[in-house]
Image (cartoon, rainbow, N blue to C red):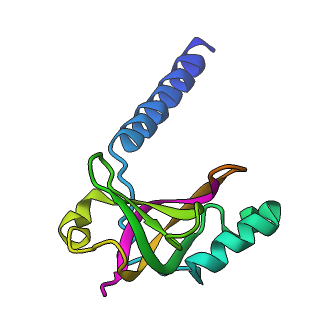
Amino acid sequence: MKRKILLLILVIAGIAVWYAYTEYNRTNTNLSNAKAAITVDALALLTQFEKDSATASRQYNNKIIAVTGTIKKIEADGNPVILFLGDAAQMSSVQCSMDSTDAAQYALLKNGTATTLKGQVSGFRTDPLFGTDVILNRCVIASLP
């Protein structure tokens, strides 16, 4: 009986060690080669979240999407670099945290440039004073201007 318990403990410990090793060494997949589930215009995406955030969240959250829009702001002083897509006259924007592996490509982008970015939707923020922000992570450039 003691041998069976000891063997069970060793098997469970072996599985735990293997799982910890694989999780520790896991990396995010690069979205450059991933296919976007949905392609949408930045202003249309913002409008959907502003009108019905619950439905938009169910439709977009955790999905890889391609967003086409005009770059209204670039925050390049931190890591990651964040590109804001949308209308410069509005407070709302699509915030795209860029994947650091593609730094050479997004260094070419400028404010006012139309582009398509691909990323995974991780949520949104709504504020009465600052508008709605849809947040994309691990973004890559789907098409250069």
* Residue positioned most to the top: 2
* Residue positioned most to the left: 104
Is 88 placed left or right of 125 in the picture?
Answer: left
Q: Is residue 80 above or below residue 17?
A: below
Q: Which residue: 29% across, 45% down?
A: 78
Q: Which residue: 54% across, 75% down?
A: 65
- Image spot of residue 126 (x, y percent): 69, 52
Q: Is residue 45 above or below residue 84?
A: below
In depth, the one of 1 and 45 nearer the eye is: 45
Q: Main secondary structure of the magenta part?
A: strand
- Image spot of residue 21 (x, y percent): 36, 38
In depth, the one of 40 and 120 nearer the eye is: 40
Q: Which residue: 53% across, 29% down?
A: 12
In depth, the one of 19 and 109 nearer the eye is: 109
Displayed quadrant of residue 108: bottom left
Q: Which residues are magenta?
A: 131-145
In depth, the one of 82 and 29 nearer the eye is: 82
Q: Which quarter of the rendering shows the C terminus?
A: bottom left
Is 95 placed left or right of 49 in the picture?
Answer: left
